[in-house]
Amino acid sequence: MLNWVWMLLMMSGFLAAAAGGHVASVTQVVMTSGQEAVETALGLVGIMALWMGLTRIAEEAGLVDAMARALMPLVRGLFPSVPEGHPALRFMMLNLAANVIGAGGAATPMGLKAMEALQTLNPDPKVASPAMCTFLALNTTCITLVPTTVVALRALSGSRAPAEIVVPTILATAFSTVVAIGTDATIRRRHGS
Amino acid sequence: MLAQVTTWLIPLIIVGIPLWGWIRGVDVYEAFTRGAAEAFPLALRILPFMVAIFVALGIFRGGGAMDWMIRSIDPVLRTVGLPGPVVPLVLVRPLSGTASLGLLADLLRSAGPDSLAGRLGSVVQGSTDTTFYVLTLYFGSVGIRRTRYAAPVGLLGDAAGFVAAIVIVHLWFGAS
């Protein structure tokens, strides 16, 4: 899929340049773009280091566990098919908590363990169970409270208020989560499971 | 009042987390530096994607194709409040986190971080996840073949996030 997007961008750009008679500009643009890309990626290091350091402190202070406990009632209500005390619940909570806090490194392993645990409850191991679908609906729409990389990129490109997008981002995320979970619940009810 | 929340949020988090960690008995300085050490490898991992996207977009814009695209679709998109330069980001966001990050970096550079396009792009990037990547990874890891309605639900969530981003950015920052 990305092959298509990438090729389309380059081919249509090249054809437009050829048609407009400024092919020479392509060479020049390519040189500066590569340079700018490196500057951008390396420019992120400072802010990312600060943020990843803080996240590590929060993790070691038990923020992920505290968050997971707070999410417990929500998770229990959303997964009626998972028996109480099943390890899947704990892994799912830890995954969501790590996602919300932005401890990306901890989120994926917990999520994969949650899928494994859900698979043990799945009657047909080749077909996604309703609980898996709900978990992924939550996982793909619920995202970190502080979009660090975005804030860092904004700071890097000279924004007057790099963090001003944090609250609007949280509101937009909340809406997408509600829509995804709502749709998932509707489908589940219609299928009678 | 809401602007105050945003202004205070980051500084409070930056001093609040170490203080809380310290009270909880965390070896704060050591934990901080261990976490911070992971930033450079992360930047190196993003770098090739940045180069790929910046170069492709550079050709697309430099050759005049971006202007052409914006001229032909912008009037339509304006009516729904979506600036043309944000379109590539919206299309790529569910496919790849690194590619869309590259698109956002380019957008912030060309349109300005405090423009409507820059703000909207920032909210779009931050508010949804790479649906296809997550589904592939999670279902693939346990050998699920039939994913049933998971992909449509995830994409519907993304679409809802995009619409919400447009509406919220317009309401939050006022018409610009």
Image (tube, coloured by chain):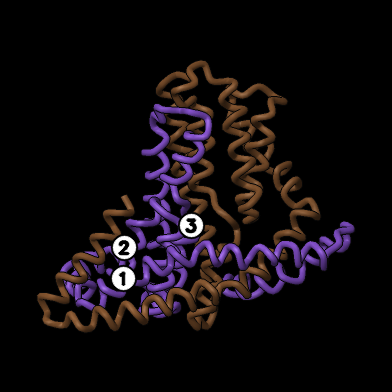
Chain colours: A brown, B purple
Residue beneath label 3, please? B127
Name the residue located 31 percent from the left edge and 66 percent from the top edge. B82
Q: Chain of mark 2?
A: B
Cα–Cα gap, marks 1 and 2: 10 Å
* N-terminal label among 1 and 3: 1
Say which element carries label 2.
helix
Q: Chain of mark 1?
A: B
Q: Position of residue B170 (x, y in %)?
A: 40, 68
Please tell me how many numbered marks the rendered image carries.
3
Q: Quadrant of residue B37?
A: bottom right
Say which element carries label 1.
helix
Q: Chain of mark 3?
A: B
* N-terminal label among 2 and 3: 2
Q: Position of residue B83 (x, y in %)?
A: 30, 69
Query: Label 1 neighbourhood size at 10 Å, few (<14), some (14-19), many (20+)?
Result: many
Residue beneath label 1, please? B57
